[in-house]
Image (cartoon, grey):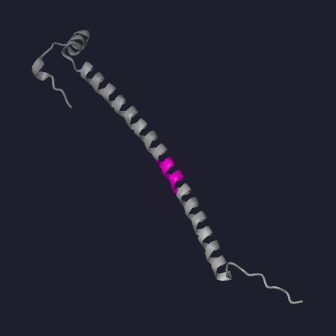
Amino acid sequence: MKKKKKKTFLSSLERFIYKLFAVIIVLLIVGIVCSETSLAQMNLDIQKQEAEVEKQRKRIESLNMKIDEMTSLDNIKEISERYGLTYHSENIKTIK
């Protein structure tokens, strides 16, 4: 009896192309996941930096309010009287 040859549905070249296509798809998926992870990490870092900037902005605002409070006319008169100085408004300069 003669052996029957099994009919192959795909040639070896076709199988290679399908495997190559599958590998490319997997690599693309891995690349997309890696880039999304990197993007998420960058967004987290940006949010942390924005929070730090806001914290510093509030600190600066607080210090500016303290400067305004210290340079107020009442405070200057009080300090000058405490040290026995006389108040001359033309000698007072505010630096900003």
Q: Main secondary structure of the magenta part?
A: helix
Can you give x and y, in whole percent of width and height, for residue 38 in the image?
51, 53
Residue at the spot x=58%, y=69% of the render?
A: 24
* Horizontal relation, residue 66 to residue 86: left or right: right
Tell me where residue 9 sits by quadrant: bottom right
Q: For this rendering, which residue is in front, 56 or 23?
A: 23
Residue at the spot x=55%, y=63% of the render?
A: 28
Image quadrant in which the C terminus is located: top left
Bounds of the magenta span? 35-42
**Residue 41 included in the magenta stretch of the image:** yes
Image quadrant in which the N terminus is located: bottom right
Q: For this rendering, which residue is in front, 21 or 43?
A: 21
Relative to residue 66, is residue 50 depicted above or below?
A: below
Tell me where residue 60 sits by quadrant: top left
**Residue 95 included in the magenta stretch of the image:** no
Relative to residue 16, is residue 73 depicted above or below?
A: above
* Horizontal relation, residue 10 to residue 51: left or right: right
Outermost left residue: 90
Residue at the spot x=82%, y=85% of the render?
A: 4
Can you give x and y, in whole percent of width and height, for residue 80 in the image?
22, 13
* Label total for image: 0
Relative to residue 95, is residue 35 depicted above or below?
A: below
Q: For this rendering, which residue is in front, 87 or 43?
A: 43
Tell me where residue 74 sits by quadrant: top left
Q: For this rendering, which residue is in front, 64 or 39?
A: 39
Outermost right residue: 1
Can you give x and y, in whole percent of width and height, for residue 19 in the image?
64, 72
* Horizontal relation, residue 44 to residue 89: left or right: right
Residue at the spot x=58%, y=65% of the render?
A: 25
Relative to residue 44, is residue 76 depicted above or below?
A: above
